[in-house]
Image (cartoon, rainbow, N blue to C red):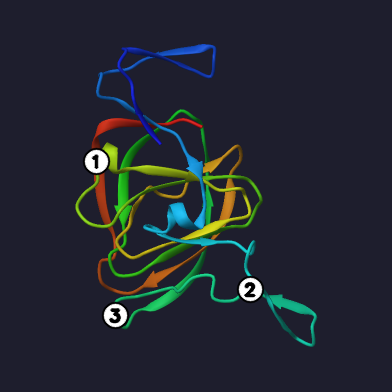
Amino acid sequence: MAVWRGSVYRVCRKTRVQRLESLQDMIIRPQALTRDAFGPFGNVLETEGVEPQLINFGNTQKFGELAQITTRDDANAQLCIYRSKAIVVPFRIRLMECHPLGSQAFYPLHQNPFPVVVAKAGGKPGPADIQVFLTNGRQGVNLHAGVWHHYQLTLNQDSDYLVIDRCGNDDNYLEHPLSEEVWLEI
């Protein structure tokens, strides 16, 4: 959720007062990550509400088809682990990025809530286009091809994420620096 501030000052964490450089600065706060709310941007990766299939003689529950990893050409999908440094909030959102040729999935290898900053695919996003979701710590996301997003953010401590995305020789990365100041508060 975005909130435009009409005053020159704002209070952060009850004890800190910060001067904003412009009346156009924007504060964004996360909303809960749900399948319906996140649908325009991709898939929520979670086992809640998914009926598992029993495999391996009943010793394994398979929660299948949580998301489809897509590529728009003959490229391969790659499996990676990203280690993200913890941010301090309020955190300035300086840029958005997108991958036009394939989806990108992030699944936490921890159980701490983390923010997901996104804007719909299409033209370069402005501050009013940005939305933030907060996971419950057991959810991941699969971003549709072309969805604008901030690089992976993590709270409280450095954390690892399992990432599945497109691997190919052509350029699958676009970056858009934000000219306005946008701040994430939780």
The three-letter code of the residue at mark 3 reads: Asp
- Residue 102 in percent (x, y) is at 34, 69
| Residue position marked by numbered label 3 in the rendering | 73
Q: Secondary structure at mark 2?
A: loop
Q: How far is disc 3 from disc 2 in space, using C-alphas? A: 27 Å
Closer to the camera in the image, 61 or 78: 61
Q: What residue is shown at x 75% (from left), y 86% (from top)?
A: 56
Q: Secondary structure at mark 1?
A: loop
| Residue position marked by numbered label 1 in the rendering | 126
Q: What residue is shown at x 72% (from left), y 76% (from top)?
A: 61
Closer to the camera in the image, 26 or 39: 39
Give me the disc on residue 86: none
| Residue position marked by numbered label 2 in the rendering | 63
Q: In the image, is 162 to the left or to the right of 174?
A: right
Closer to the camera in the image, 136 or 83: 136
Say if mark 3 contacts mark 2, CB within 8 Å: no
Q: In the image, is 144 to the left or to the right of 126?
A: right
Report the residue that reaches farthest toward the bottom: 57
